[in-house]
Amino acid sequence: MRATTIFPLANLHNLRTELDGLFRPFPLRSGFQARWSPRVDTHETEDAFLVAVDLPGVASEDVSISLEKGVLTISGERKSPFGLNGDAEQRPHGKFEHAFPVPDAVDTESIDATYKDGVMTLTLRKTKESQPRQIPITVA
């Protein structure tokens, strides 16, 4: 029999979103817009850490990326296309912020960010010292 790990709080955010929807008058909204959090994928390769952030509808000039005390922060704002407090808005908008601890193995001077088709991709290259290398064996 295979052991399965259950994370009971994994879908808590989705549950809250669904419950909030039950109490929202349709088609009008209350005017309160909660902060939203874009979806993020991370991946580690042999020589870099990669971060992809979904930011459709967010202009690149509305995004800020900073590195301070070992924490990389991506913040910005998705603006409502019709101004504030639109009728029956289902797409999230407002300010967002995502913070990542940066491992010591990252060369902080070589972090790159590119923005294409609504996806911000960050490349955090590893330092030469942290990359795996083969050790030659000398036969005596």
Image (cartoon, rainbow, N blue to C red):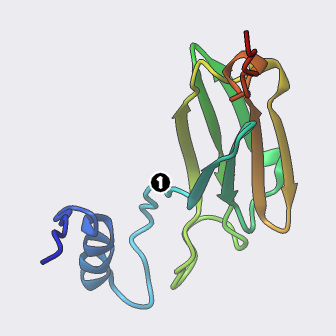
Quadrant of residue 15 in the image?
bottom left
Q: Position of residue 62 (x, y in %)?
A: 77, 47
Task: Inspect the image, locate mark 1, and give the three-letter code of the amino acid beneath it.
Answer: Arg
Q: Which residue is mark 1?
A: 35
Quadrant of residue 87 in the image?
bottom right
8 horizontally vs 10: left or right: left
Quadrant of residue 84 in the image?
bottom right
Q: Look at 54% across and 43% down and name the residue there.
A: 98
Categorize mark 1 by other alpha carbons within 10 Å: few (<14), some (14-19), many (20+).
few
Q: Secondary structure at mark 1?
A: loop
Q: Position of residue 76 (x, y in %)?
A: 67, 45
Q: Position of residue 133 (x, y in %)?
A: 73, 27
* 121 shown above or below 91: above
Figure label count = 1
Q: Look at 76% across and 61% down and name the residue there.
A: 119
40 horizontally vs 26: left or right: right
20 horizontally vs 64: left or right: left
Q: Between 131 and 110, which is closer to the camera in this rendering?
A: 131
User: Which residue is most to the front?
Assistant: 140
72 horizontally vs 30: left or right: right
* 82 shown above or below 68: below
User: Which residue is most to the left?
Assistant: 1
Q: Look at 60% across and 51% down and name the residue there.
A: 42
Q: Between 70 and 1, which is closer to the camera in this rendering?
A: 1
Q: Position of residue 51 (x, y in %)?
A: 67, 48
* 24 shown above or below 58: below
